[in-house]
Structures are given as structure tokens and as C-alpha cells.
Amino acid sequence: MKSREAKSDSLSKRTIQIVSARKLQCDLMANYLTVTTGVICKIASDPGAISVNPQEPENTTLVLLDCPERDPVKYFMALAVAGRRILSKCLVALFNVRPGLGIEERAVSWGIRGFFYETDTVDQMIKGIQTLFKGEMWLSRDIMAKCILSQRSTGESSKKDVIFLTQRELEILSMVVSGATNEEIAARICISPHTVKTHIYNIFKKINVPNRLQAALWAAKNL
């Protein structure tokens, strides 16, 4: 009982935003984290719905991004949609990650601070959340070593240029990659199909691809 009270005291002024389309799981998860740690939990259905208070001190909010997909492209499209607005202001970690996908190095280069895997226990997740709020990363030693070696081998000069797609274009590209039609995209973000078509034309022109398949391949390689 005392350990739970200590956890509550340490995180009572922090916020966790859980991003997932799986409402029941998130409601249970949010309730458990609040009862166990005292942290304030909010739920968003997608990265674009994350709310960031510009007056809030940095690193007092942890975004937990649900990544159950087996296709790594979708992980990084979700991160691209979240954008610098989130990554520069909040701590971001991925959960429901499948072990062995090999996405950690690229995710860390984006600014991701930790990973919670499908096989992790509840206690491991609580410990990881506490560690992240202390300003540390939640990575295995092996993954951390790989990230450091990768950073040393690539060097500063080989870093990718800043992505030249707008936030809206990244959002639409993520839906294109997931297989959404123009009409579905239009309905989801409340714009006309004609406007969607114009955005997609501009995206294809910027990344120099002729179709949706090539756009997905480009996203897998560059994001």
C-alpha cells in the first residue's frame, strides 16, 4: 500500500495521454494508471487529437502511442503526424510494440524516449513510466548500445533534412499509406474530396512518386 502511495505522490502532477483507437483497453489502462500512480490520464483516438498546453512546463506530459501494427511504416507515419509539436514538448513512448520488429533505432532518432512491449508486465510499465518522468529513457541496454553506435557511425553530417511536407500533408499521407480512399480521408478530416485530391497531387510531386504504392514505399524509407 505504501509503495502505491509513493508512486501517487511522485506522479500526481503529471499527465499521460494515451493514443489508441481501442477505447475499452485505454479506459481500463487509464483507470489503472490513475488509481495506481495518481497521474492524470487522457485518451485520444489518434495523434492529431493530442492536446498540448503551451503554458505547461516541458516533459510533464507523457504521450503513450499505441503501436499494435506489424507494419513498421505505420509506426513512423503515426510519429510523423504527431510532429515536432508533440515531440518537442512532451515525452513520447510506444506501447504494444511487437518484440523483434527492429524499429527502435529509427524511433529513437525521431525523439521517442521508450518502448513498452506486448510481453511487458504491468509492473514493468509502471516502472518505465516513472523512469521516463525522471527524464531518463526506457530502453534495454542492447537497444541503447545499438542507438549509440548507430549515431556514432552516421555522424551529424548524415542526418536527414527536415521533412518538407506540411503537417496536413503528413496526416493525409499517413491515411494514404493505411489504404484510405480520397472520400474516406475527406470525411475523416472534414474537407472536400477535391481538396484531398489536390493535397495528394502536391504530396506526390514533392516526394516524386506517381502513385499510392510508391508513396507508401517512400514513407517506409524516409520516415
Image (cartoon, rainbow, N blue to C red):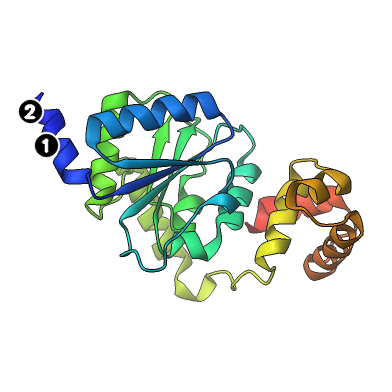
Residue 152 in percent (x, y) is at: 39, 64
Q: Mark 2 falls on what kind of element?
A: helix
Q: Nearer the viewer, residue 107 or 145?
A: 107
From the image, which quarter does the C terminus lie in?
A: bottom right
Residue 116 quadrant: top left
Residue type at mark 1 is: Ala
Look at 21% across and 52% down and name the residue there. Answer: 134
Farthest left residue?
Answer: 2
Look at 81% across and 42% down and name the residue there. Answer: 180
Farthest bottom residue?
Answer: 157
- Total marks in image: 2
Q: Is residue 160 left or right of residue 62?
A: right
From the image, which quarter does the N terminus lie in?
A: top left
Mark drawn on residue 2: 2
Residue identifier under label 1: 6
Residue 45 in percent (x, y) is at: 58, 40
* Location of residue 8 with respect to 216 vertically, above or below: above
Look at 63% across and 50% down and name the residue there. Answer: 77
Residue type at mark 2 is: Lys
Look at 82% across and 63% down and name the residue there. Answer: 199
Residue 173 in percent (x, y) is at: 74, 54
Residue 31 in percent (x, y) is at: 36, 29
* Location of residue 209 with respect to 23 vertically, above or below: below
Q: Mark 1 falls on what kind of element?
A: helix
Task: Kindly tell me whether residue 217 is visible in this rendering.
Answer: no
Q: Residues within 10 Å of mark 2 (few under 14, many from 20)?
A: few
